[in-house]
Image (tube, grey):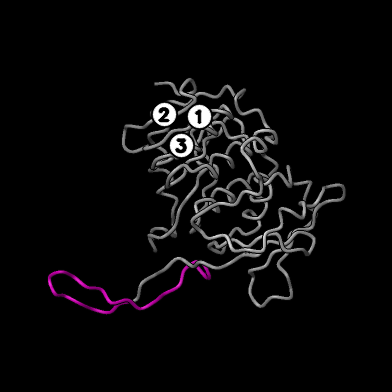
Amino acid sequence: MGRITVRRPVLRLSTTGAAGRRPDTLAVEEPLEIRVAGRPLTITMRTPGADFDLVTGFLAAEGIIGGPGDVAALRYCADTTEQNTLDVVLAPGVNPPEAALTRAFTTTSACGVCGKSSIEALAAERPYDVAADPVTVTAAVLASLPDRLRAAQRVFDRTGGLHAAGLFDAAGEPLAVREDVGRHNAVDKVVGWALRADLLPLSGRILMVSGRASFELTQKAAQAGIPVLAAVSAPSSLAVDLAEDAGLTLVGFLRGETMNVYTGAERIAT
């Protein structure tokens, strides 16, 4: 799988006293510097792969671009030895990010990035009316999504070290699944794929994530026009507040045949 995984030696121990050395497969984590028109914007730690999707999804979440026509070109920078610097050329007429948004710091794989200064600013800049989405989803379909997402996690099978995000239709059919060491990166890769295919807004779709539902992931879902966000783990209080404000259905602790519906229960048919 190229740069997605690497092999490292490990000492495997057991409480029974057994010990042995063996190779282990690890998920790769490398920095990706994002530049716009040659100017550094931010650095994120990610698993290499689907970098174009990752960058376009990130820019969409930040409100810098809104569709595939806003991007003139995506290219790895020739002045670097590795494919870890990607430059975005915006289309004529598309405003570059404000200087205040330019960040000269590293974003870890544990958190997302938000260039906005307040929740009020986020709400004011939402491009789609998620609350008006009339989609309904059955509880049975939602209950099937963790297994469908897990079945598509090829790199997780080898490493056990990646998050996943999957985009599904209302019938539970997968449209795109992406993996990454950062849960927010996995979502950006899915949204970026959709943006490059000119599918935004993602009306009537479900975003399924393998971990918790954080504020960042809820914001990214709302920014992409996704009406339903489901997670196998817990949401944060701010994620619930944001989902309620945006009119987004938020489901957590989706395990087996049970789930907790925190907002937007009217979209779920039992």
Count of all numbered marks drawn on residues in the image: 3
Mark 2 lies on a secondary structure that is: strand
Q: Is 26 placed left or right of 89 in the picture? A: left
- Considering only vertical position in the picture, is 179 above or below 209? below
User: Label 1 amino acid?
Assistant: Thr
Task: Identify which residue, 33 or 159, lies in the foreground.
Answer: 33
- Considering only vertical position in the picture, is 219 above or below 177? above
Mark 1 lies on a secondary structure that is: strand
- Considering only vertical position in the picture, is 17 above or below 127? below
Compare marks 1 and 2 and give the one earlier in the sequence: 1
Q: Is 102 placed left or right of 176 in the picture? A: right
Compare marks 2 and 3 and give the one earlier in the sequence: 3
Question: Residue 249, labelled with which disc?
Answer: 1
Q: Is 9 placed left or right of 194 in the picture? A: left
Mark 3 burial class by Cα count in 10 Å: few <14, some 14-19, many 20+: few
Mark 1 burial class by Cα count in 10 Å: few <14, some 14-19, many 20+: many
Residue tagged 2 = 261
Q: Which residues are magenta?
A: 1-22
Task: Identify which residue, 131 or 21, lies in the foreground.
Answer: 131
| Residue 120 x, y percent position in the rendering | 65, 35
| Residue 239 x, y percent position in the rendering | 50, 37
Which one is closest to the eye, mark 1 or mark 3? 3
**CB under 8 Å between discs 1 and 2:** yes
| Residue 199 x, y percent position in the rendering | 67, 39
Residue tagged 3 = 237
Q: Is residue 249 magenta?
A: no
Q: Is residue 21 magenta?
A: yes
Mark 3 lies on a secondary structure that is: helix
User: Label 2 amino acid?
Assistant: Val
